[in-house]
Amino acid sequence: MLALAVLAALCAIPAARAQQASPSAPPEDEPTTLATMTVTAQKREEQMQNVPISVTALPEQLLQDTGVRDVKDLQVLVPGLTVTSTQSEVQTTARIRGIGTVGDNAGLESSVGVVIDGVYRPRNGVGFGDLGEIERIEVLKGPQGTVFGKNTSAGVINVITRRPSYTQSAEGEITVGNYGALGVSGAYNDALSDNAAFRIYAAKRKRDGFMDVRTGNGPRTLNEDNDQNFHSLRAQLLFEPTDNLDINFIADYTSREENCCAAVQTTIGQTSLVINGLTGGTGLPLQTPPFPKPGDPFARVAYSNRDTTQDIKDKGISAEVNWDTPWFNGATLTSITAFRDWQAINGLDFDFSGADILYRNADEDQSLTAFETFTQEFRLTGATDRVDWMVGMFYSDEDLKRNESYQIGPHYEPYVSTLVFGQVAPAIAAMGLPINTANPQNFFREITGQPFAGFGAMDRYQQNAKSAALFTNNTWHATDSLDLTLGLRYTREKKELSSLYSNPNGSAACATMLQDASAANPNRFARLAGALAGRGVPLGALTPQQQAALFGALAPQIAGFMCLPWANALHNGRSTRQEMEEKEWSGTLKAAYRWNEHVMTYASAARGYKGGGFNLDRVQSSNGLSSGSAGIVPVDDTSFPGEFVDSYELGAKTTWRDGNLLLNATLFHQTYDDFQLNSFLGTSFVVRSIPEVVSQGVDTEIIWQPMRGLMLQGGLMYADTKYGDEMPTSEFVAPGGPLYKLPGSQISFAPEWSGTASVTYERDFGNLLGRFNIGAKYMSEFNTGSDLDVEKTQDAFTVVNARIGLGAQDGRWMLELWGLNIFDKDYVQVGFDAPLQAVGSPQPGDPLNTYNAFLGAPRTYGMTLRVRY
């Protein structure tokens, strides 16, 4: 009802006042107002108010005022946009209207596409970094697959940077701030000749970490985390040899050498007693029973005895050619050719504690995610009196390489052994049998006589994905007021994955346990029986049938913990090869009607598509199938199908006050089939295809310039985004299924309400110019975990940024004081099960379980001096 009321109000203008108005560009003598803002949402320049798409356009000055340097900063300006990162900045995920992709799985592609200067970035994390000199950013909501391609089923973040000009200019910036922040950047632009120009930009930024780290007994010595240390270089060369031809070359390079990302404990369970027992009280925050206890995450104290060094290198070249051809009434041929090379190395303390349980080193052989991507796009765009048309083709060739390893530390065996014995001993006692409970940390060794140590896993994945598409997007101006748009895209994609698994330490303990439990073993369960007898269990008091029942109940549980993915001998020496091919149609149909010069309404239907893929992880189950329950049988087929969305929108774009007040609203209803949910199940990330997810609501926006020097921009979104009621596997069934909370629930990272507001005010002070901006983002309560555990709920919160500056009227210099999250609002980005520490049931408040979180940034503030020549 709210959405209908908004649309009715926007459209309620008497028909008698209607004036025929073409949705094409304004006459040349029309004054520049907000109404003349242009976007390239359909890959041609159009007035934003004439485009039948829900799009938020963010100009350079607003981005600068609100401190936006990358896609993560962008969310403060866009309602319905959420950007989070987890154990590395590599795992950065953007979501629109609650829809996005989560998890450490490079085989899982993005739902929100990131496009920078026409070049598609294969994952959100690949597009994360200093974007440099931004001309504007357009955030397109809803499926955009027709024009921007697959993997844009939730929307697109379209970044346009400043191109070279023929005016000589130089700009510089220096920033200092709290946490030891220091940043410098500079740009130079000049003409090489009458038809050639270049632009070069460079930046260096450093900051201390805002997370304190307790390193336990090491070997880590660095006592802070989440720092910043990167530099970027970007160069452009523009040729315009004739009036109808321009060629722009871009080369860029970014290096990030930082420490990220430590996690904190939000809830502390009984397993913390074992960790602190092994570390002398330095493993986790000390807590007393009863458990679980709430942690104090916003003390920003993390526990990590291993380094979290990350080393990210991103480089690429591209060439964009635009030629106004003599064909088809001057149609424009556009070619964008790009090659990108991106790689990330990330050390990790898997257990996020001061105990030495599981880790990997920041070494290319142990931890590498790398993409090499070639893309080529051709578009031919033209227009007649009645039709704006575009046809094109797109090709990409992507090589993905992933090296994944697990190092098993000296605390691993006593820790897991203690946990398992804590379940075995009560089962024995429940049968009325005595058992010696001393030294539970030795239980595994008593069974197998084999240690857990060294390299548990060293795996190699190599994937090639080739994609080719033909597309067309055409608008027919049926009348001076009515536009009909038809877009179609045909995509063919082929993926090939080769995986090689190895256990350098041989996983002798797991192998011994499997051999002891094997039905083919004539002395079956002899080792388990010996270990129990050694603890005083009178097995002779049981009948052979009772002994068999006891061993049959205990052995799978013990083997399950001895053969967790990184220690499972069944993976050692495996090699698999998988292939998949998809041929899919996507498209859109839109109708836009301009009632008069103030009001345009539109209706659209779209079919979106996100490609399927493979889990790039050790996947195991009870039966060797991805759909199976928890188990130790390796899964060879780790594929998951493509994701589809049917989207319907009804929108209005209205213009008031001589073009200086824009009020827009969109009703949306989106149904996703085979939604790709990537869940962390405590030991690995596994993609589950959810049969149905429905996202529906209303999205509103206002841009208002009530007087010279004052600008207001904001929006409010209501999104009801829920999983369907289906239960595709036993994991979705209560009470024991880890995903039982999902059916019928609001999905994670999907607040029902989100809103943004930004106010900018400029005023002259003699020869000086003052400028003030304040911006805020509100999000209602939402869950930050893929399994919707109540312990991962984030309460409603608001983040506020502000900036005030004073400078020269001619723009030669400006000094700014700024603050981000100025009220120091505490909030969680992502909540998750503490690895190997949430071994209880998925029921709320289980005393065994510990939960962790990656936090949002605290308050930061500083000063920036900008100079321009």
Image: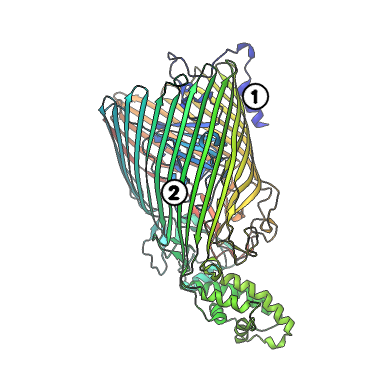
Q: Residue at x 63, y 72 (%)?
A: 557
Q: Is residue 851 above or below residue 73?
A: below
Q: Which residue is mark 2?
A: 858
Q: Quadrant of the N terminus?
A: top right
Q: Is residue 609 above or below residue 262?
A: above
Spatial CA span between label 2 and label 1: 41 Å
Q: Which residue is mark 1?
A: 8
Residue 794 in view, yes or no: no
Location of residue 145 by image quarter:
top right
Q: Residue at x 35, y 21 (%)?
A: 243
User: Considering the numbered disc 1 on the image, is that residue within a helix, a strand or a loop?
Assistant: helix
794 or 645: nearer the viewer: 645
Q: Amino acid at mark 2?
A: Pro
364 or 129: nearer the viewer: 364
Q: Amino acid at mark 1?
A: Ala
Residue 643 location (% of width, % of height): 60, 45
Q: Is residue 859 above or below residue 654?
A: below
Location of residue 186 by image quarter:
top left
Residue 169 in view, yes or no: yes
Q: Which mark is residue 383?
A: none
Is the image coloured rainbow, by chain, by secondary structure, or in one colour? rainbow
